[in-house]
Amino acid sequence: AQSVTQLDSQVPVFEEAPVELRCNYSSSVSVYLFWYVQYPNQGLQLLLKYLSGSTLVKGINGFEAEFNKSQTSFHLRKPSVHISDTAEYFCAVSLIQGAQKLVFGQGTRLTINP
Amino acid sequence: DAGVIQSPRHEVTEMGQEVTLRCKPISGHNSLFWYRQTMMRGLELLIYFNNNVPIDDSGMPEDRFSAKMPNASFSTLKIQPSEPRDSAVYFCASSFTGGSRETQYFGPGTRLLVL
């Protein structure tokens, strides 16, 4: 079975500061990796995904993530955050072969302070 | 495209009542997923369909929950009878499953409160 651990439940950051949201996963087989963002009272929106190829993946809104197979990590980064980035961020995995369901981490609430 | 459409957006009901949640996936998508989000358990998959056929319902909590997909453009999730512990946000998502894993697009969710 697959599992995802988001190491920080809450991350407060000042506006224009850099941020890293951490994600580690566990799986005995290869997986695809995703980051989703959920703004208050809204559904989930895909930020970026890693399927194959370059381990550095760029997404929307200036976010990027790096896949590290040896450390089974997929941390999300942004060099300079904005107030509008305040949201909950979810890391997720799905199998490459077989069931395509997403297994989510518990989420990290990113709060941007002015 | 209108995206994934869910209705109702909010539902308040009393324990024991039947609740039906509805989802219209994105046109052309052939996979549909129902997720539940709670504070205690986070986001968890309840069931998913591929080409209108249920593929994995191992996440359905118990017999009180049932889901159908009578055609490619409509799915329902029914809870009968409802209980207070069913209070959660229920998301529907859809994707096109081709040769590789495609993005799942989520609807806005239905916020269910069972009193």
Image (cartoon, coloured by chain):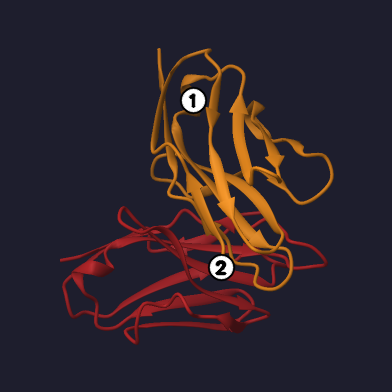
Disc marking residue A92: none
Quadrant of the image for the N terminus of chain A?
bottom right
Query: Which colour represents chain A?
Result: orange
| A12 up-or-down from A23: above or below | above
Crowdedness of circle 2 by 10 Å Cα count: few (<14), some, many (20+)?
few
A36 relative position to B42: left or right: right
Label 2 vs label 1: CA separation? 35 Å
Q: Amino acid at mark 2?
A: Ala
Within 10 angstroms of label 1, few (less than 14), some, or many (20 or more) residues?
A: few
Residue B9 horizontal/vertical position (percent): 37, 58
Label 1 sits on a secondary structure element that is helix
The C terminus of chain A lies in quadrant: top left
The residue to which callout 1 is attached is A84
Residue B56 point in image, percent of width and height: 56, 79
Visual hue assigned to chain B: red
Which subunit holds the residue at mark 1? A
Q: Specify the label residue A1 is tagged with.
A: 2
At label 1, the amino acid type is Ser
Mark yes or no: residue B3 visible: no
Q: Residue at x 34, y 82 (%)?
A: B62
Question: Which residue sits at x=52%, y=76%?
Answer: B75
Which is more toward the observer, A2 or A112?
A: A2
Q: Is residue B10 left or right of residue A87?
A: left
| Lateral position of residue A72 relative to residue B92, left or right | right
Q: The residue marked by circle 2 belongs to what chain? A: A
